[in-house]
Image (spheres, coloured by chain):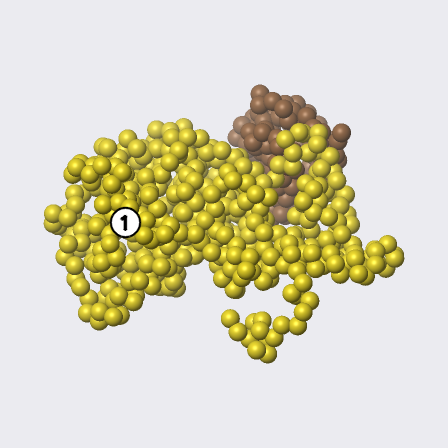
Chain colours: A brown, B yellow
């Protein structure tokens, strides 16, 4: 049994970042998923959502929810990432000063997602966009 | 809907309730439904915040208190009084006057709750330094907030402070002092003059502890009226010199917004009001908040000065207390006379009792079923139902929102035909007759709302 839904994300609009995370969070609570697992899902989703808002023009979050796992796919139209290995390092950020001023862009986004996901795949094409695939097992606590 | 597990201080009086639904609309945990023209409480969701009590126009929601005569079951009768009681009176009325009235009512010792906070200050610092609690640590002072977190934000339970409330410390202290003077524990009655319903729930069914050192609660409005009447009849104030030393000016303001947070080292933040708190906790749960070490959250605007059992304006109460704190002279905070010993002298004893002893358990309002597959089916069904419900949250179905109705339906606590839009469109398609629709409306709202009544508020012969 599965459920699928999509959320649109608009680049640059930080005031609305976090909507998808809140919605997904409520559904996981309804399913009775363990709080520590919910936390990991929410961290991944929120960081990834903020990445789209901070760097891309627009994007789509698609969520596949099963009873034992959740699959998040975030596809954006944006500048892409030239050097993924570098972007995965803690503290590395290309965020603009304006974005940093709002408290974002500390360079923890991608490493944080990677640490909280059970499976994490990132693909990027410079000049076109980035796709993140995040899978989290809803039954275990192990990272 | 009955669940004997949680003690609630709030009760809905069916004989008075007009089913106006104002309470249903303000409840932060969607714990109220309208059935047969009366408000009904879903007990395992209620957090005793008292928002419904505040809103009820006909005083149909009451806050249960212990019978006052119970005070006389004990030979040592302690009244624990929070500072906001004093804050309700004009500044000529001293704490000694209040103490004198309480003693004339039968109490043998009147003690200010905020003394207990003097013990907590170092205890919280110690917890912040030593314990590996996730940041921010959330104050567990306000019982409505603790319960809100259990019900709506269970992921944040681990952030809750493990330190008890000033009330517990004050009660432990009073008991210990009296025992040291030869009293038996069973002879000591400790009664708390409560500013709200949540504190009653905390005393009657404590979270994080097996039992409470408090013997009973007296509602503050009752005491306020009693003091007011006595002072007015007396004309002259007593200036009871037997009253103990003043509370430390910092901790005196502990119950007000930022009163606690400003006493704690590190980066602190104070938020009051149920809506503000919920909005912030939503963000905190999403991990959107960084850089805060200690979070003081209060269900009521202006903290306990806005408690539902206070009779005076919350801003005036807060201002009077701030003025009182400014006017405490050095030396007044130390023991003046032989009334009772300083709480500081007992700090070693109290520090051993400062931490909660049992885990705080989640009681999520969201969980649809214990079985994941079943929960998934219910969630899917609820989303399908939402396709049909209008999404305007009119409340005519007797539930606070369309989504609440959808969830009630999948929990077998409601029916789609409760929705007036669904009924109207079914009647249009001749799938339902008008009589059936009217009868459903009456099942929700009761017969009375369909009968002319000139006594209601705003009507020709308005009466209360």
| Image quadrant where residue A72 sits | top right
Left or right of B55 on screen, residue B436: right
Is residue B150 shown to the viewer in this render? no
Mark 1 surroundings within 10 Å by alpha-carbon count, few (fewer than 14), some (14 through 19), many (20 or more): few
Which residue is rendered at x = 33% and y = 53% of the image? B68
From the image, which quarter does the N terminus of chain A lie in? top right
Q: Nearer the viewer, residue B310 or B380?
A: B310
Q: Position of residue B110 (x, y in %)?
A: 24, 51
Which residue is rendered at x = 38% and y = 62% of the image? B311
Is residue B341 shown to the viewer in this render? yes
Q: Chain of mark 1?
A: B
Please give the residue where the numbered disc 1 appears in the rendered image: B72
Which residue is rendered at x = 80% and y = 61% of the image? B435
Left or right of B160 on screen, residue B406: right
Classify B373 as above or below B149. above
Q: Position of residue B132 (x, y in %)?
A: 40, 28
Q: Nearer the viewer, residue A19 or B210?
A: B210
Which residue is rendered at x = 78% and y = 54% of the image? B422
């Amino acid at each position: 049994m599965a459920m699928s839904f999509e959320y649109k994300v608009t680049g640059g609009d930080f005031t609305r970042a976090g909507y998808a995370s809140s919605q997904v969070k409520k559904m996981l609570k309804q399913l009775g998923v363990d709080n520590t697992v919910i936390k990991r899902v929410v961290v991944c989703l929120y960081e990834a959502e903020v990445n789209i808002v901070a760097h891309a023009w627009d994007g789509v979050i698609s969520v596949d929810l099963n009873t034992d796992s959740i699959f998040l796919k975030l596809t954006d139209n944006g500048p892409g990432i030239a050097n993924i290995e570098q972007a995965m390092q803690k503290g590395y950020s290309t965020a603009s000063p304006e974005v940093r001023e709002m408290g974002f862009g500390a360079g923890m986004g991608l490493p944080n997602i990677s640490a909280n996901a059970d499976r994490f795949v990132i693909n990027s094409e410079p000049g076109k966009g980035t796709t993140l695939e995040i899978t989290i097992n809803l039954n275990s606590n192990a990272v | 809907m009955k669940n004997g597990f949680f003690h609630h201080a709030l009760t809905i009086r069916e004989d008075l309730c007009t089913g106006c639904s104002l309470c249903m609309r303000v409840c932060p945990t969607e714990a109220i439904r309208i059935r047969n023209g009366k408000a009904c409480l879903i007990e395992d969701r209620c957090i005793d915040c008292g928002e419904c009590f505040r809103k009820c126009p006909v005083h149909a929601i009451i806050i249960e208190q212990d019978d006052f005569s119970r005070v006389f079951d004990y030979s040592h009768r302690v009244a624990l009084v929070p500072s906001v009681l004093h804050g309700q009176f004009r500044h000529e009325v001293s704490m000694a006057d209040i103490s004198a009235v309480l003693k004339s009512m039968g109490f043998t010792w009147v003690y200010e709750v905020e003394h207990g906070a003097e013990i907590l200050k170092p205890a919280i610092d110690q917890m912040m330094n030593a314990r590996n609690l996730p940041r921010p640590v959330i104050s567990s002072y306000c019982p409505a907030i603790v319960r809100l977190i259990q019900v709506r934000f269970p992921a944040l339970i681990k952030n809750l402070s493990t330190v008890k409330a000033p009330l517990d410390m004050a009660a432990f202290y009073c008991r210990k002092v009296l025992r040291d003077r030869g009293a038996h524990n069973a002879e000591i009655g400790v009664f708390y003059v409560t500013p709200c319903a949540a504190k009653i729930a905390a005393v009657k069914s404590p979270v994080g502890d097996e039992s409470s050192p408090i013997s009973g609660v007296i509602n503050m409005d009752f005491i306020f009226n009693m003091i007011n009447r006595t002072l007015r009849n007396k004309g002259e104030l007593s200036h009871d010199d037997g009253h103990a030393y003043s509370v430390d000016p910092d901790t005196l303001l502990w119950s007000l917004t930022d009163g606690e947070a400003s006493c704690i080292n590190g980066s602190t933040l104070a938020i009051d009001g149920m809506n503000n708190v919920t909005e912030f906790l939503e963000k905190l749960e999403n991990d959107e908040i960084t850089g805060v070490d200690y979070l003081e959250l209060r269900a009521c605007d202006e903290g306990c000065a806005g408690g539902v059992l206070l009779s005076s304006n919350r801003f005036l109460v807060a201002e009077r207390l701030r003025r009182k704190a400014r006017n405490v002279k050095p030396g007044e905070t130390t023991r003046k006379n032989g009334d009772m010993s300083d709480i500081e002298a007992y700090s070693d004893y109290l520090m051993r009792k400062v931490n909660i002893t049992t885990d705080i358990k989640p009681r999520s309002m969201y969980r649809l079923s214990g079985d994941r597959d079943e929960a998934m089916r219910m969630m899917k069904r609820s989303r399908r139902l939402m396709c049909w419900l209008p999404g305007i949250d009119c409340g005519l179905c007797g539930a606070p929102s369309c989504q609440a109705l959808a969830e009630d339906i999948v929990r077998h606590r409601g029916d789609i035909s409760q929705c007036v839009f669904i009924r109207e469109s079914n009647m249009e398609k001749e799938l339902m007759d008008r009589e059936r629709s009217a009868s459903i409306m009456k099942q929700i709202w009761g017969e009375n709302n369909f009968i002319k009544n000139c006594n209601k508020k705003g009507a020709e012969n308005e009466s209360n």
